[in-house]
């Protein structure tokens, strides 16, 4: 059972919203990837395994948007892993904020 597609193959309201959110977050992650690559220069950026992973996820998301008829379970799985990675960055961000506040 797929709750995002009607019996006639059209997207449900939730399906349309999910697609819009997918496009929005893919744009945000793509923009963040370019900013990260520019800020860290290419060689330093490409040597980080997480950045390679980000490139893979953003590329898969762009493919998912461009060709919506392919199965997207892998893309969703990778996005879930990326969200887990973001939780790790929250601790780093908290340290940066606390260091800034104390200075």
Image (cartoon, rainbow, N blue to C red):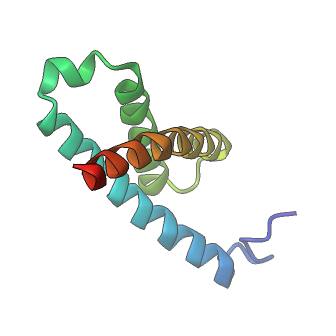
User: In front here: 69 or 92?
Assistant: 92
Q: Residue furthest bottom?
A: 13
Q: Is residue 80 left or right of residue 38?
A: right
Q: Is residue 4 left or right of residue 19?
A: right
Is residue 39 depicted above or below 29 in this figure? above
User: In front here: 72 or 35?
Assistant: 35
Q: Residue at x 30, y 45 (%)?
A: 99
Quadrant where the N terminus sits is bottom right
Count up the numbered dots.
0
**Residue 79 location (% of width, % of height):** 56, 45
**Residue 43 location (% of width, % of height):** 16, 17
Examine the image and state in which quarter residue 24 appears. bottom left
User: In front here: 22 or 51?
Assistant: 51
Q: Residue furthest right?
A: 1
Examine the image and state in which quarter residue 73 appears. top right
Is residue 61 depicted above or below 39 in this figure? below
**Residue 7 location (% of width, % of height):** 80, 76
Q: Residue at x 48, y 47 (%)?
A: 90
Q: Residue at x 43, y 28 (%)?
A: 53
**Residue 10 location (% of width, % of height):** 66, 77
């Amino acid at each position: 059972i797929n709750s995002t597609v009607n019996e006639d193959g059209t997207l449900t309201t939730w399906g349309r919203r999910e697609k819009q959110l997918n496009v929005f977050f893919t744009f945000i992650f793509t923009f963040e990837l370019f900013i990260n690559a520019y800020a860290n220069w290419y060689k330093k950026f490409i040597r980080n395994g997480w950045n390679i992973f980000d490139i893979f996820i953003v590329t898969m998301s762009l493919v998912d948007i461009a060709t919506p008829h392919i199965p997207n379970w892998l893309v969703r799985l990778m996005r879930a892993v990326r969200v887990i990675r973001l939780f790790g960055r929250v601790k780093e961000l908290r340290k940066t904020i606390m260091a800034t506040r104390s200075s």
